[in-house]
Amino acid sequence: RKEVEQDPGPFNVPEGATVAFNCTYSNSASQSFFWYRQDCRKEPKLLMSVYSSGNEDGRFTAQLNRASQYISLLIRDSKLSDSATYLCVVGSSGGYNKLIFGAGTRLAVHP
Amino acid sequence: GAVVSQHPSRVICKSGTSVKIECRSLDFQATTMFWYRQFPKQSLMLMATSNEGSKATYEQGVEKDKFLINHASLTLSTLTVTSAHPEDSSFYICSAPFLAGGQDTQYFGPGTRLTVL
């Protein structure tokens, strides 16, 4: 079983749509959680941290359910520029030791 | 924000040659840096943790004699792929730890695309 699992997609959605990505992780001792965005042939860039209380940044909302070991990302009012691969990332322990990456979910937003 | 640079951005070399990749933290010091490798359509895989002033820590299955890591200063780590072969062709990315939103995370360099002929 992979440590971080994501639906690879692709998700093909029209502009303005709402899209949700899910992720599960296997290590219950994981301490930190993130969503990164990776454009084709580029490095990953931090999109947002994820907290149990849920957090929102503009059109993006992230949620963590520790009991279910489940992380989600909701994108509202999709833009063409949102097209990318979204990586679910889990920190394996306290501090900055080892980020475990999911394989990513591809999103394609079309006009 | 934090900036991590990598050089070169792209390398094409012949089989058997060695390739050196540099990773620099530009506006902060990093006693630890991380080296990842990403094959097409796969996730980033951690290769090793680079530690300033001490030996690197390699992940299981990564050959330390093939992937030489040197953390020469608080802002520079280098990865040398020795005797490169076509199967080493990949996207190599370094990162440095940073605090974001109260959580320790990592910022990534722009990556180095290595093609071994």
Image (cartoon, coloured by chain):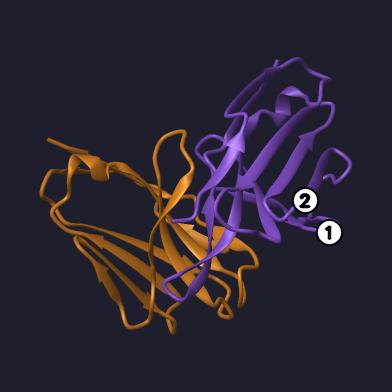
Chain colours: A orange, B purple
The span from disc 2 to disc 1 (Cα, nearest Å) is: 7 Å
The residue under label 1 is: B53
Image quadrant of residue B86? Answer: top right
Q: Secondary structure at mark 2?
A: strand
Q: Nearer the viewer, residue B78 or A110?
A: B78
Q: Residue furthest front?
A: B27
- Residue occupying image coordinates x 71% and y 61%: B31
Report the chain holding disc 1: B
What count of labels does the image hold? Answer: 2
In the rendered image, the vertical position of residue A28 relative to residue B69, given as above or below: below
Q: Is residue B8 visible?
A: yes
Q: Is residue B62 visible?
A: no
Amino acid found under the numbered disc labelled 2: His
Q: Which mark is residue A40?
A: none
Q: Is residue A89 left or right of residue A21?
A: right
Q: Position of residue B87 (x, y in %)?
A: 72, 28
- Asked if labels 1 and 2 touch by Cβ distance under 8 angstroms, the answer is yes
Q: Is residue B100 left or right of residue A28?
A: left
Q: Is residue B86 left or right of residue A108?
A: right
The residue under label 2 is: B71
Q: Quadrant of the N terminus of chain A?
A: bottom right
Q: Using the rendered image, report if marks 2 and 1 lie on a common chain.
A: yes
